[in-house]
Amino acid sequence: MRRKIVIIGIDGATWSLLMTWIKDGHLPALAAFTKNGIWGYLESTIPPTTIPAWNSLSSGMRPEDINIYAFMHRIRNFTFKPYFSSMRYKKVPYLWDILTEHNLKSIVLNVPVIHKPYRINGYMVAGFLYLDENNLTYPSELKRELDNVVGGYEVDIVAPYPLTKKEDLKRLKNITIKQINAFKYLLKRKEWDLAFIVITATDTIQHRYYDDKKALLDFYMTIDRHLVEIKDIVNMVTNGKYRLFIVSDHGFGPAYRVFYINTWLYSQGLLRLKKKPNKYIQCFNALASRSKNFLLPLIPLSLRKRIKSKIVKESSIEEIIDPESSVALGYGNMGLIYLNDTLSEREYRDKVNFIAEELKKLGMNILKKNEIYKRPEAIHDKRAPDIVITIDDNVSAINTSIGKCLFSKGKGGNHRLDGIFVIYPCMKREDNAKKLQIYDIAPSVLEELDIDVPKYIYGTSISEKFNIDL
Ligand SMILES: [Zn+2]
C-alpha cells in the first residue's frame, strides 16, 4: 500500500536531551511517536554538519558521491567559499527530484540544501542558506500566498545584527512558528506525496544556549505542540495512510572544552602569519560575549551592524595567514584541517601523519582523508578536508583564533555524530533503539512510496537492513 510520507527534520535534535524530557512528560507528541513507532540513532556524515548531512539524508548518498563535503570548500590553497552554487556541484538527485521523475508531488520547505528554488513536480521554499530573498519559492507566486497565510514568511535564521538572548530566542521562535504554519497550510491545501520540512532554528539555539536547558525545553515544547497538529492534519488529508519520519542531521552535546586549533598549528610551526593577530579584537569579542545582554540594548541597530561586519573581517584567519609558508590551517568550527595544496605527495603524507599523531597524543580522535572517503576522486579532491578532528566530550568545540592557550572552558553546545530518527506509525517492537545511517532514510522513503530504489543509492532501506516490514 502506498502511503504519503512526511519528513520533519529537527536540525541537531539529540536523544540525550529529548529522552529525558519525554520521560518527564514534557513532550507528549514525541512520546507517542516513539511509543507507537520505531526510533533510534541516526549516524551522521563526517563532518557531522548541516551541510553535507541534509544533502546525504535527502539523497541517500555520501558527501563524496554528492560532491559536497562541508559548508565551505577550498577554492585555492587556504581560500574558502561556501557551496552556495551547490546545484553546480551536486552530482546526484534528491528525493523530490526522483519523485518528479515518477510523477509524484513533493512539498519541500526550508531544507538547508536548497539555496535557490527550482522547478519540481510540487512546491519548494528555499532554506536558511537562500541566495535571493526575492526568489524564495517555486512556483514564485507561492511566496505571496505564504506571506498572506503566516503574516510575512521568514527564512532568515542569521540575525542582521547582534541580539540579546531574549531577543534572539523570541525571534527564532517566531520564525519557526511561521515556517511550521506555512507547512501546515501546504499540507492542507496542496496535493502531495512527500512533504519535507526542516526546522533549522534548533541548531542555532543549541549552539548558543545549550547550557540553558529551560530555554531549550521551552522551544522543544512549542515544536511538540505543533507536531500533534501536523499529525492530525496529515491523518485527515491522507485518510490515515501516511508515515511520519522525524529525523535530525546530527546530534548535539555540550561545548565545554574548546581546542584552539590554529594556536596549536602555529605553536608547531605549521601555520605562519603575515601579521600579528589583532589582540584588541579578541578582547572585544570576549567582552562583548560577556556583556552583550545588558550592553546591546543600549546600542542603536545601525551601529550593531557596523560593529559586526568589522569584527568578522578583522578576526578572519584568511586575512592574516601567510599562505606560502604555512603547512596547515584549521578552518571552521568543526575541526577540519586543510594542508597546503602545493606540498609534494611525500611531504603531504609526512605532515598528515605528523599532525594526526600529535593530536592523538592530546587525546583526540582523528580521521584522515583516506579514512573518511572511499572514492579515489574524493581522496584527491583538494576541496575536501585533509584531517577531521572528531567532536566529542574530549574536544567539544573548536576555535580558529590564534592566542595564548590551547584549550579553554567553553559554553553553549556543539554537534555530535548521532542524530535521531522516529518512524510513526509502525508496528511496536521490543527491539527498538536501532541504529541507522543518515544515508538509509532516502531509500526507506522511496520504498514506502513504491518507487524502486535506484542501484546507485548508497544507503539501505530500514526494511532491508533489519529484515522487517514497517
Ligand atoms: Zn545541523
Image: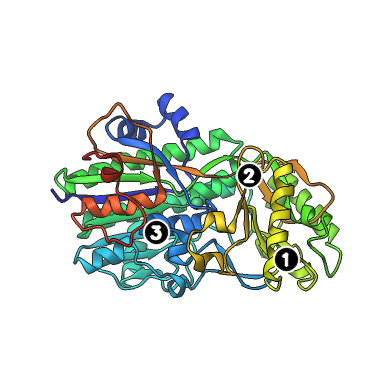
Residue 202 appears at what percent x and percent y? 49, 46
Identify which amino acid the numbered label 1 is placed on: Glu
Q: Hey, which residue is sitting farthest front in the picture?
A: 346
Residue 256 appears at what percent x and percent y? 67, 38
- Does label 1 or label 2 sit earlier along the sequence? 1
From the image, tell me which residue sits under label 3: 61
Residue 332 appears at what percent x and percent y? 64, 58
User: Residue at the location (82% across, 55% down)?
Assistant: 268
Q: Observer-nearest residue: 447 or 51?
A: 447
Residue 311 in view, yes or no: no
Residue 129 appears at what percent x and percent y? 49, 64
Identify which amino acid the numbered label 3 is placed on: Met
Which picture quadrant has residue 61? bottom left
Q: Residues within 10 Å of mark 1 (few under 14, many from 20)?
A: few
* Left or right: 265 in relation to 56: right
User: Residue 275: which numbered mark, if any?
Assistant: none
Of marks 3 and 1, the one in the foreground: 1
From the image, tell me which residue sits under label 2: 365
Q: CA distance from mark 3 to mark 2?
A: 24 Å
From the image, tell me which residue sits under label 1: 347
Callout 1: SS: helix
User: Residue at the location (33% across, 34% down)?
Assistant: 29
Q: CA distance from mark 3 to mark 1?
A: 32 Å
Of marks 1 and 2, the one in the foreground: 1
- Does label 3 or label 2 sit earlier along the sequence? 3
Residues tagged 3 and 1 counted as in contact (Cβ below 8 A): no
Q: Is residue 8 above or below residue 141?
A: above
Q: Observer-nearest residue: 66 or 118?
A: 66
